[in-house]
Amino acid sequence: MSSFRLSKGGRIDRARPLDFTFDRKPMQGFVGDTLASALLANGRQLVGRSFKYHRPRGILTAGAAEPNALVTIGEGGRTEANTRATLVELYSGLKAKSQNRWPSVHFDLGAVNSLLSPFLGAGFYYKTFMWPAAFWEKVYEPIIRKAAGLGRATYEPDPDSYEKCWAHCELLVIGAGPAGLAAALTAGRAGARVILADEGFEPGGSLLTETAAIGEKAAADLLGETLAELASLPNVRIFSRTTVFGWYDGNVFGAVESVQKNTATIDPNRPVERLWRLAARHAILASGAEERPLVFGGNDLPGVMMAGAMRSYLNRQAIAPGKSTVIFTNDESGYRTATDLEAAGLEVAAIADSRAGAPSSWAGRAPVFPGALIQDAKGGKALTGVTMIKGGTPEAIEADALAMSGGWSPIIHLACHRGARPVWSDAKAAFLAPETQDGLTIAGSAAGVGALEACLADGAEKAGSVLRNLGFSNASPAFAPAPDTATVTKPLWYVRGAKAKAFVDHQNDVHLKDLGLAVSEGYGHVELTKRYTTNGMATDQGKLSNINAIGILAEARKVSPADVGTTTFRPFYTPLSFGALAGSSKGKHFQPVRKSPLHDWARKNGAVFVETGLWYRSSWFPKPGETTWRESVDREVLNVRKNAGICDVSTLGKIEIFGKDAAEFLNRVYCNAFLKLPVGKARYGLMLREDGMIYDDGTTSRLSDNHFFMTTTTAYAAGVMNHLEFCAQALWPELDVQFASSTDQWAQIAVAGPKSRTILQTLVDEDISDAAFPFLGARQVSLFGGKLTGRLFRISFSGELAYELAVPAGYGEAVADAIMQAGGPHGICPYGVEALGVMRIEKGHVTHSEINGTVTPADLGFAKMVSMAKPDFIGRAMLSRDGMVAQDRLSLVGVKPLDPVTTFRTGSHILSEAAAPSLENDQGYVTSSCYSPNLGSTIGLALVKHGPKRHGEQVTVWNDLKNEYTKAVLCSPVFFDPENEKLHG
Amino acid sequence: MVDFALLHRSALAGAKTGSFGAVSTGSRIALTALPEGHVLHVLAAHGSGALQSLVAQIGDGGPYAVRAYGPGQWFVVGDAALSAADLSGKAALLASRASIADQSHGRVRIAISGASVEAVLAKGTAVDLDQASFTIGHSAMTLIGHISALITRTGTDSFEVMVLRGFAESLWDDLIQMSLEFGVDASTAD
Amino acid sequence: MASLIACPHCGPRPKEEFTVKGDAAIARPAADAGEDAWYAYVYLRDNPRGRHKEYWHHTSGCRRWLVVERDTLTHVVYSVSDASTQGGTA
């Protein structure tokens, strides 16, 4: 392979090559490579163009903080933009593309933006393109958007599946580096349920990348032994490829697991990503530390890399950074990289150590320059050399790789998701989070610990202490205490005098001068600087850049970083796919379907269904030859009124109410009287809210002294049940009353029409003549000669002689079939909710179209039902307030067009006949309307000021949306059979 | 009188059956619609004291027949359908101390088992199903995805899920979806 | 994303299983308590920063109404109890 891949070493499996493409060019890597390491192995240092200036960019890190190497992975519906190449596990068939370049990453016309850079500085959005105003949307923004940006999302649907899972543990360990492994091992041995989550495809953290020995043992050997022991413990679960992205209430952590993002052959039986909610009694945050970049000229050139990342590529994937490397450091990390490079036989041209008192323990070949600074990196699309300032004198050094280290920032993001603020520590030269919070302890380098042995000890010690608090008294640390030998030096925030742009935020192209500008223009507060310069606002959320920006602001403002503070950390720690957030809730799993027990009966009778909440209800039942829904509905209505019809009303809410205080309870939740409802009778009931408005209506029947059966509207079934439970449990716990929702127990069938009694009597064993079973009768009945027991109610929504028969749901279809069979000779037909709606409007019966949260009983003509004689009921106290009894309240009326060939729509407003359309002239509005085949015209119900006093008045029905004006007349809301002769027939 | 064969239609009569998902894993899931026998919702009257042993008497003696569901509420379940006479006999046994709402047609029981059953259910519920705390015979009313259901552990690798009849088919489909990675055999033989 | 409420009857459950009704610190007045008391009960609510008592219904669990005392700032839950033990009526 290329000269960048060393002939030996690393954790890659050279026996298992993997073919992939980058910008359509075929390349090869190995199992154990990331896309980033494979690109480097193939000599691809230039992998993208920067956001604003289109500068050539290479790979800066080896992990989650990567700001530059954003690529688009996959094709078609699997296209995933802005993926960090450093986190992509290489697989055979991977197709990656660079972003933000046209026509190619090598020759990018957008790089002309670099020449415009005087106009693209901090705040350029706010000041450069201010004039003329009209130009912003039409000219400036499209050009800027085209030139600046990241990858493009696909418009095709994602073909893969996602899911969400819960997991529970005593100890969650976040990060499988030294501290995390030590914590997990300690807890695992103590017998606690442990979840160890790690972002990488291989647990180990710095143990994977460091060549140091721990005691007598090589880091890699220690890792192997620890993982083997953890794997042998059944109480320990290791989640690799799993990023914990948020810490939430109740000590629940959000995590996303990549299940199949590492393969081109997706198994459709498994999700590609899994969103975990990890409920932990306690968590150890061992997320490690992020190496700080140094801010000098050209620090964004391909070939410039974090020192730790260079070590990682070298030791994990046997990647040589180049032929000759310069180290720029103010920390030990630079020396570790130099050591490993030289051990691999690579040349280190120079070690520029910004510290005047650089350590004298260096035993390598490379020259060390204490107190030296790299001022500028040189090169075009790749690094060619650097300018080093030593004792005030510039010196040019040739190099094709540069490793930088500015010290370490603990990764405390998660620890600050629930309100804790980072605090600047002079001792650690870093922001730290509180080490212990309720449910979370920070360990290892995330807590500012430096040396590897000390991280192991810290993780073990803290886990032991946490577990003992959780009751695992036998928990003892898996590693012995070790002192932290790492030293901390004063941070170097930036190098003065650079000729080229010195980048602070690589992803958003914010450079040193932008921050200076922000301070000089009065935007020096950390939150203002962020918005003004966009520093830290890119997809990496400033993982590398925020700390340097804070340091630079502090110097510019001549204060401590403690005084500058940080911006607020919020979930998610890294970007999350929409697929993972949606989980399995897509397609038919988006929401459940609730099926009536008569669903299949309706379907075999040809029903057209309508979604009503989660229910599917029968809308109408078209017959052959009927071409419009109106034809079917008109026929159904006329047939019910002439013969009979059968309708599925199983979706109504049904509640069994038990207890010796059940009657008293109903008397308090309904505004009308229920205390003396006789056994065997149903009563229409109105339930109010405490503010006096109607909440819901329905019928309630008394089946025995202490057993009632309530029905609610379909829409409010769940709400009414909750309301009843609230009243019983929270308001009147002294009452003996219990509730059982029985909505699903009963198939409920309305049989309506003049022939309904004749038809039903053929099924029902008892006498249901008018004398034996008058209007509002309610009783248990025997069916088919004792084969079945059901409940029969003589109630009517259509205004016809009608019954509702409830039978156990499993027999619903059989009973409906029997009714159809018995009703055949009498002309029975199935009817749906549309016909039901027409008939109830013809009778002036209200539904939630009228009970819309603004109406009192009196508004709907129910004033006399309200029993003010009762000492108390829900809503009573507010019913007599001024506004509730005002004379001009909108009240129920009927409305019909003057000319029956004209029509109007629901929602239209009512104007006095000659009044101009205006808010002041508004008299009310149409709440329901339909075509009545019995009246031969549109009819409607409306809420109108002084409504009942205006029957006979001519008005205009006005629909401004459609510019419709219909001359109409107000009338009684009961259009059909006002004397209720049919009902009592 | 209509002479009519009174056919019972089970809630999952139209649900999909067969084998789905991964072909050969060592931890296949079995999904089985249980007989729609009886489900009695028992509600304790106000101040009726400890009823657990009384409630146990109305059960059919099956090992997990009585399932606590909330304060003073139980489901008593069994595979045999009960007659009206059976029901009134049980109601009489409880006398005035508790009421029975017959939910035999309103709730549907589904058995789910297999070595991966906890992993499957963890995709739906936030309840910790670890056997140390969720012991055999233990029940919990909870959300499985979007649907409320009563989960009962019937064995180390087996649970029963009881759901409102109207949601049974949706939950059935969800459980199949959740089991695909392990492979699932779904049967509604009734 | 997630949070858990410790139902006294069912144990810790996610917020999706619950329905929140609001202020539980106010008691329903007596029927004859007068217009002012009723006006306050129906319409007036404090919006405290800090400790707050709320009614939560364990809708998808035991179906009990609970009183959850929590901190509106930090979401720390101090206590959860069955509403029937709180005395909701003045």
Image (cartoon, coloured by chain):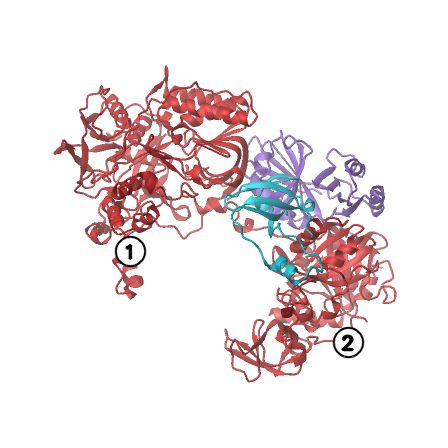
Q: Secondary structure at mark 1?
A: helix
Q: Could you say where residue A360 lies in the image, as x and y percent from the top left?
A: 22, 20
Q: Which residue is mark 1?
A: A125
Q: Is residue A236 above or below residue A560?
A: above
What chain is tagged by disc 2?
A
Q: Which chain is purple?
A: B
- Residue A538 image position (x, y, % from top left): 34, 46
Instruction: Count the numbered circles shown.
Output: 2
In the rendered image, residue A377, in percent from the top left (x then y), is placed at 19, 37
Residue at the limit of the structure toward the bottom, as seen here: A914
Labels 2 and 1 positioned on one and the same chain: yes
Which residue has dot 2 on it?
A: A979
Name the front one of labels 2 and 1. Answer: 1
Q: Residues within 10 Å of mark 1 (few under 14, many from 20)?
A: some
Marks 2 and 1 in Cβ contact (< 8 Å): no
Q: Colour of chain C?
A: cyan
Q: Is residue B85 left or right of residue A122?
A: right
| Residue neighbourhood size for the residue with mark 2, other residues' Cα within 10 Å, grouped as few (<14), some (14–19), many (≥20) | few
Is label 2 in a helix, a strand or a loop?
loop
Q: Is residue A945 above or below residue A374?
A: below
B6, B11: nearer the viewer: B11
**Chain A shown in which color?**
red
